[in-house]
Image (cartoon, rainbow, N blue to C red):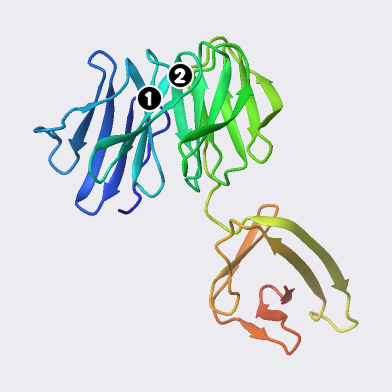
Amino acid sequence: MGAGFYGDGAGLAGHAGGGGALAYVADFGSNTVSVIDTATNTVLTGPGFPIPAGTSPVAVAVTPDGKHAYVANAGSNNVSVIATASNTVVATVPVGFLPDAVAVAPDGKHAYVANRGSNNVSVIATASNTVVATVTVGFEPVGVAVTPDGKHVYVANGRTVSVIATATNTVVATVTVETQPFGVGIVPPPPGVPSLAFNAKLEIDLDKKQNEDRFELKSSFTLSRTAPGINPLTNPVTLQAGTFTTTIPPGSFKKHRDGDEDEHELEDGLFTFKG
């Protein structure tokens, strides 16, 4: 069952399965989860629908593979795990007091539950559906979100945001914000080439002959794990220095024996780029 759109820990989440996209809605007043077929915008009915959950469900998050939905039940202090293939509850996980929000890591291995009444976050291992860590955060946490790289969890508390390092399940920073934040979301980095390091230097050669002066820009960069990759032999490359921007078209680079790629083009004189 393929992944699709996911919840942010609020009362609505969804996934795109083989038969189409489904949305899961936490029904606080009826202790159930309604399932909406987004192709027709109709609520699924019949035996097993709506899906029985715990007491006062308030938040839903779907795993990236779309196979399970995690439902935080504020009234019964637990999380219902729904198998989306059968739309049945396959596990119930006890957590802290008054769980108010839930988020699933991008790799699907852990779910993070903000417990408003006990001022902590329960970390659930999705493989076993057991709590493997409890992290103390600020006062009355009500929102939770995981960064796209899965390294940090941001928790919205009464007047602060706690930053949890997922490798150690410890709070590594506390950020003061305005009164009573009720949600938190992570914006992924813009498309491009994320890099861990970038180095460049400029060499200017003032030739004795007129109109033959040149400058040479040498640069190197190290891609991060999230970088989609770049092939300067087939991809266009955009260079920017201050307000000046130029795009080197595909096919302008030539591969050297040592693996470097050079590009030469006439741009108000000779411009040489080495990467």
Q: Which mark is residue 41?
A: none
Front one among 219 and 271:
219
Q: Amino acid at mark 2?
A: Pro
The quarter holding residue 211 reads bottom right
Residue 167: % across, % down: 66, 41
Q: Are marks 1 and 2 in contact (CB under 8 Å)?
A: yes
Residue type (three-letter) at the residue carrying disc 1: Ala
Instruction: For residue 184, say whether it is visible.
Output: no
Residue at the (54%, 44%) spot, across then down: 148
**Residue 154 seen in render:** yes
Task: Using residue 104 as the reference point, say whether residue 167 is left or right of it.
Answer: right
Q: Which residue is mark 2?
A: 99
Q: Which residue is mark 1?
A: 59
Image: 163 above or below 62: above
Residue 134, percent across and down?
60, 25
Task: Mark 1 or mark 2: name the one nearer the start of the chain.
Answer: 1
Distance between the alpha carbons at the discs numbered 1 and 2 = 9 Å
State the residue lying farthest toward the left: 46
Indicate whether 70 appears above or below 221: above
Viewer-closest of 223 and 5:
5
Work out whether residue 164 or residue 91 is closer to the camera in this orientation and state it. 91
Nearest the eye: 20 or 238: 20
Q: Position of residue 96 (x, y in %)?
A: 51, 18
Q: Residue at x 67, y 22 (%)?
A: 175
Q: Which residue occupies 82% across, 77% down? A: 213
Q: Residues within 10 Å of mark 1 (few under 14, many from 20)?
A: many
Dot 1: what SS?
strand
Mark 2 lies on a secondary structure that is strand
Horizontal side, residue 171 vs residue 95: left or right? right
**Residue 36 on image: x %, y %:** 19, 35
Q: Nearer the viewer, mark 1 or mark 2?
A: 2
Q: Residue furthest bottom?
A: 257
